[in-house]
Amino acid sequence: MNLPSLIPEMILVAVAAAIFLGGAFWDVRRLWGWTAWAALASAALALGFGPAPGLVRWLAVGFGALLVPLAARAASAESLGALLVSIAGWMLVARAADLATLFIGLELVSIPTYVLLALGRRDAEGRESTAKYFFLSVLSSAVLLYGFSFFYGVTGSLELRAVQTAVPTGFAAFDRLAAGLIFAGLCFKITAVPFQFYAPDVYEGNTYPNAAMLSVVPKAAGLAAMVKLLAIALPCPGAFVWQMVLAVAILSMTLGNALALWQDNLRRMLAYSSIAQSGYLLIGLATAMGGVASGHWDGIAAMWFYFVTYAAATTGAMAALEHLGRSDRRLDGIEELAGLGRTRPAVAAVLAVCLLGLTGVPPLAGFWGKLLLFGGALNVGGSARLWFIALAVVGALNAAVGAAYYLRVVAVMYFRTPLATPRAEGGRGAWWIAVGCALLTIAIGVWPGPWRVGCGTWRAENQEAAPMSRLEDRTPQDSPQTKKTATPVCPEPWRGGARQCSFWLGDAIIEDASDNIVSPRCEFVTKLRKNLQ
């Protein structure tokens, strides 16, 4: 990672510093809003002409351009500066090539988020929600850093490319411990079970623009870090990691959708929806690690495609609700939307499109996202096939459950008698962002091909060789070294039966399914041969 490739991030951080400094002397919100948007446009130009644009960095700039106008009307200069820094952190995570830079990028997302939440609402409820997020975020960062220490101890390197080819000797238990701690720390970022319990209170205790930011920015950074560390960099994680991801995906989908059914507060409902959506996203990660890594059912591409659809629909819904509110009072209850299809039909239509997109109704974008995720799970072969069939079935059932609370809101808007006409004092910025997100949800649904192809470039951007979770795709010719006695990446022998798993031994592959053992001089080969007999 060279310095010119970080020019977009440097632009955002420099402009954020200027906004912090200028906001202390001049309280001109419109000026700082346009300055923040100009910084994102400049970062986009630098990204387009730079050496390493990258899918996730483009997503960061794109959704940053949506979040800045949404927050600019009521936000202070400090809030806009913090938002730019968090976008820069998201981009840095996507570009990170070592553990230190990756952790700095994640903290550049987390620390400005504390500032945004603290400045969003300054009443008792807002302070309580900010304190909850702060302490739990600090705890998750500590767990993540502890996992990084084990990761470094196992591989002996901070560089992710060096980690890919690292050959630990006898540290399988620490390998799993590192993966578990890293996954636990990142689950907080993406609001996945069991680290999701802060989300409803934090969403309810803050503004819609801040809730939209929490729904998109930390989740994207956490997903990018998960893919880099667990699906690409971790040497030969075995079945343990994808089983862990699969279990968390099922729990997140089920718990999020089940609790969202009981919510009457819109912000809490969307918080539980975000938890459920994290479960759907983890289906793609589990699929990529469990068997399908490329082709039409690439789990990573499906995950990023679904993230785009989720982020667009969620941001649009939050923007529409922000537009309907008043300057002195938020629109919170589902019942407050009664008859909105009659009193404000345009806003009701936009909100309905976003909610139906989250539901997965064709031909909107969410349908294709869920199709790619569930289809990828159904196309996993080998001994893990039944696990992933069950995952796809649970995902489909949860999609049906999720449709209940999304359609409930749509029914209230169109089939209930109006109680009052919402004042809609949220500003034109929120309205146009809502319209843009609704149109994006429709456009992706009508024309998903280019978006699917674009999301499929993520793996190529972050990996020169095949991922360690798909070792059966590698051949002995992949190694730059000549034949010699190999040291195993996975020293733990698999016991019993024809498991379809491969162990990369530096210059040789051992496949226990066919007992095709290469490099018999390796001590581990002898142990493995005894266990296979």
Image: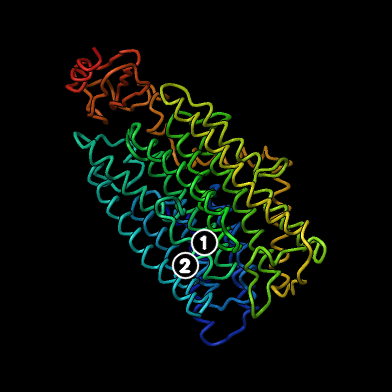
**Residue 513 place in picture, x, y as percent:** 35, 16
Left of 433 or right of it: where is 493? left
- On residue 214, which mark appears? 1
Frontmost residue, 488 versus 187: 187
Farthest residue, direction bottom:
25
Question: Mark 1: which amino acid?
Answer: Leu
**Residue 445 place in picture, x, y as percent:** 70, 43
Label 1 crowd bin: few (<14), some (14–19), many (20+), radius 10 Å: many
Left of 436 or right of it: where is 291? left
* Residue at 47% from the left image edge and 79% from the top image edge: 124
Q: Residue 80 sits in which quadrant?
A: bottom right
Frontmost residue, 234 versus 477: 234
Left of 114 or right of it: where is 532? left
Do we see residue 342 in this rendering?
A: yes
Q: Residue 495 sits in which quadrant?
A: top left
Label 2 crowd bin: few (<14), some (14–19), many (20+), radius 10 Å: many
**Residue 304 place in picture, x, y as percent:** 55, 44
Q: Secondary structure at mark 2?
A: helix
Q: Is residue 517 above or below residue 63?
A: above
Question: Mark 2: which amino acid?
Answer: Thr
**Residue 449 place in picture, x, y as percent:** 67, 37
Q: Secondary structure at mark 1?
A: helix
Farthest residue, direction left:
523
Left of 244 or right of it: where is 523? left
Residue receiving disc 2: 113
Q: Are marks 2 and 1 in contact (CB under 8 Å)?
A: yes
Q: Is residue 123 above or below residue 290?
A: below
Q: Earlier in the sequence, mark 2 or mark 1?
A: 2
- On residue 457, which mark appears? none
* Residue at 23% from the left image edge and 41% from the top image edge: 174
* Residue at 47% from the left image edge and 23% from the top image edge: 381
Q: CA distance from mark 2 to mark 1?
A: 8 Å
